Image (cartoon, rainbow, N blue to C red):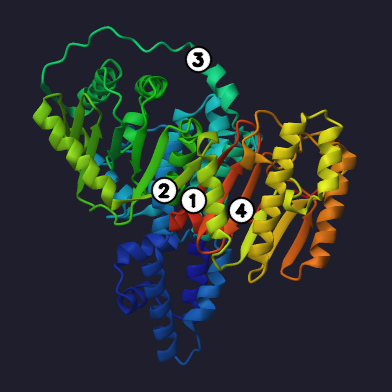
Amino acid sequence: MRFSERLNEWMELADCTAKELSEACGLSAATLSRFRSGERTPDQEGLNLLLQGLCSIAACKGKQLSPDSLYAQCTDCMDLQRSDPEALRTKINRLLTVLHISSAELAKAISYDPSFLSRIRSGQRAPADPKRFAADVARFVVRRFDGESGRSAVAHMLGVPFGSLSGEAEYFRAVADWLMGSAAAEDTESSSVSAFLNAMNSFDLNEYIRAIHFDELCVPNVPFLLQTARTYHGLEEMKKGELDFFKATVLSKSTEPVFLYSDMPMEDMAADLDFSKKYMLGLALLLKKGLHLNIIHSLNRPFQEMMLGLESHIPLYMTGQISPYYLQSAPNTFFCHFLKVSGSAALSGECIAGCHEDGMYRLSRGKRDLAYYRKRADDLLQKAKPLMDIYRETSQNELNAFLAADSETAGNRRNLLSAPPIYTATPEFLTAFLTVRHIPEAEQRKILSFAEQQRILFLRVLQDNHVRDELPLLTQAEFEETSVSLPVSGLFPEHDFLYSYKEYLEHLRLTENFEKCQPNYSLELVHFQPFSNLNILIHEGKWAMVSKNKAPCIHFVIRHPKLRRAIERFIPPIIECE
């Protein structure tokens, strides 16, 4: 049923005329007429006024109507979309970020003032008619992403089958409904965390290096001529400024760490794919040169955008040359800032929020300017907190020290594991496991010693805290479709030690026996494997560690409260088998 039909029924029930209802609820006669004809539907405030007016008129005529009972009848009005402004804002931002659409392009397509659209995106304003706004955006998406690859990208974003967008009407309705859907209709936080973890689970650093020909990159050494200082006005010049900064840094003799910070808008520059490729090449050259990057991430963004940004940085984090940070206090909502500093150049910029195209960058190479901007970067780093601690082979001792110190810290733990834990494996099991693979004796001793240390630390935790391990119980067919390896990522091995199915079941049995002997330990066997290459260790309220088990191994200890809580609350999706 349409809302217009429901409203006319209510008016008959209350025995009132359009004029009476208009006066009782304070809405104009023209607005009420549009509601009755179906030309428009009311927002939440308008609906409340209508219900109060109807009940007031009914009471004067001796009829019993309650706003609650009328409101309950709205559930079957398919055209009555009660929008959630924050959900709509979040989805618009997600749509532009994921599909690489600039605010300027969308504003022009839907005939919106660019500055007003920017304020909608930042949450400062809301569309006067959300339903119409969503419909205009949906029409733009249908036109802009009409090809097969475009529809496929949109289908992935909406979480619907590609075939459901085959017809233009179905395509439009799917996008419009997604934009107008309530935030409660989907667990966006969980899906964002899941996407982040899946990207990390499937990422292979060696394959990535081969794909981008990182090993073949040559750091140029041709002198780069640039005056002491230069300014860049507007988006196109600012893009050139960023690339000039990379050139000046790569071609210099300096090996000082590079500092990067920006809370400037992302979408305008990200929409330029050619610039994005050059920007990523610039970062790759910095890493190829061996420079260390200190990046302060701006997390004052919707959760989904924050996770997408982190997901895109996974290749950089895997190199071990990145130290990520964040600022606890959110920057102001009026001024945006930009600062990049290396040993040879500094690029500083600013703009007013919502007016990125009117911003300016200044590239400096003078000693006095460099000293000023370096001090500014150092001061900002002093106010920042580590977003995550990243441990690779070169920091194995630091990882062991962290885990040893944490074993003395109170708090319950929850672990999502892809293989039975090393601390439940007996020395006899491990010796047989390693011997059959002809592992050299020195390496065997190293692994056995590591397992014993992990067992001691784990038993120390169990003395006063509860730990729950969640493990996959795989059938032989499921086991053969994946790779399950002995969990020794803390040793940063050069290769993986894969189980046979018989060994995998034996280690599971040892883990079940371990549970029977430890009252503070619980084991939950699940009939699915969400991540084949990850272990996720959670110290509730303290940190979450995501460990990549496949060589080259890497460990991320996440402390940022928002991200840590999201991982703590994360429940892996269960795929039902027919």
In depth, the one of 451 and 121 nearer the eye is: 451
Task: Please tell me which of labels 4 and 3 falls first in the chain.
Answer: 3
Task: Please tell me which of labels 4 and 1 falls first in the chain.
Answer: 4
Cα separation between marks 3 and 2: 28 Å
Q: Position of residue 457 (x, y in %)?
A: 64, 57
Q: Position of residue 432 (x, y in %)?
A: 86, 39
Task: Please tell me which of labels 3 and 2 falls first in the chain.
Answer: 3
The amino acid pointed to by label 4 is: Leu
Whether residue 413 is visible, yes or no, is yes
Query: For the residue carrying disc 1, how many other residues have a C-alpha within 10 Å: few (<14), some (14-19), or many (20+)?
Result: many
As helix, strand or loop, the secondary structure at mark 2 comes to loop
Q: Position of residue 241 (x, y in %)?
A: 22, 24
Q: Position of residue 149 (x, y in %)?
A: 55, 25
Q: Which mark is residue 215?
A: 3
Left or right: 353 as drawn, with respect to 416: left
Q: Which mark is residue 387?
A: 2
As helix, strand or loop, the secondary structure at mark 4 comes to strand
The amino acid pointed to by label 3 is: Asp
Cα separation between marks 1 and 2: 6 Å
Return the residue at label 4.
537
Query: For the residue carrying disc 4, how many other residues have a C-alpha within 10 Å: few (<14), some (14-19), or many (20+)?
Result: many
- Tell me whether the residue at label 1 lies in contact with that at label 2, contact meaning CB atoms closer than 8 angstroms: yes
Q: Residue at x 29, y 44 (%)?
A: 117
Return the residue at label 1.
558
